[in-house]
Image (tube, rainbow, N blue to C red):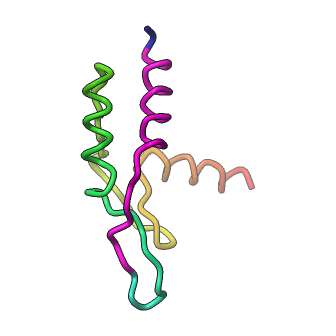
Amino acid sequence: MSVHKKLMQARVKILDTKLEKTGHNKFAGYKYFELGDFLPPAQRIFNDLGLCGVISYTELNIRCSGKYLTKELRQIIKEIRYYL
């Protein structure tokens, strides 16, 4: 089976998993998923399907408008601004 089919199976299984939002924003009054809410079930599902979840970070992150951008994305933005 191709990796794309396995990934689709993993997505469906994660959707079928009853996940609970354990994070709580007291100021705005809403709940949110934390990493620990979905990562363990996702890792089990990936393992069952013979997949490996990989998390990747770049060496350089910069802060721009409240969001972190990679060095490569920063270069693309510079090039876009040059042509505008």
Query: Horizontal placement of 6 versus 23: left or right?
Result: right
Q: Tell me the quadrant of the picture where the C terminus can be found.
A: bottom right
Position in image of residue 56 (x %, y %)? 30, 41
Above/below status of 40 relative to 1:
below
Predominant secondary structure, magenta span: helix
- Tell me residue 77's x, y (percent): 58, 53
Seen from the viewer's position, the closer of residues 38 and 66 is: 38
Q: In this view, does 72 lie above or below 1?
A: below
Left or right of 57 on screen, residue 64? right
Q: Which of 35 and 71 is in front in this view?
A: 35
Number of numbered discs overlaid on the protein picture:
0
Magenta-tinted stretch: 3-24
**Residue at horizontal 48 percent and vertical 43 percent from the top:** 15
Task: Give the answer, above or below, for where 45 lies relative to 79.
Answer: above
Q: Between residues 72 and 48, which one lies in front from this camera angle?
A: 48
The N terminus lies in quadrant? top left
The residue depicted at 28 percent of the width and 19 percent of the height is: 50
Q: Where is residue 38 in the image (x, y as percent from the top left)?
A: 33, 51
> Is residue 61 part of the magenta span, yes or no?
no
The location of residue 46, given as percent across then percent down, is 31, 30
**Is 23 contained in the magenta span?**
yes
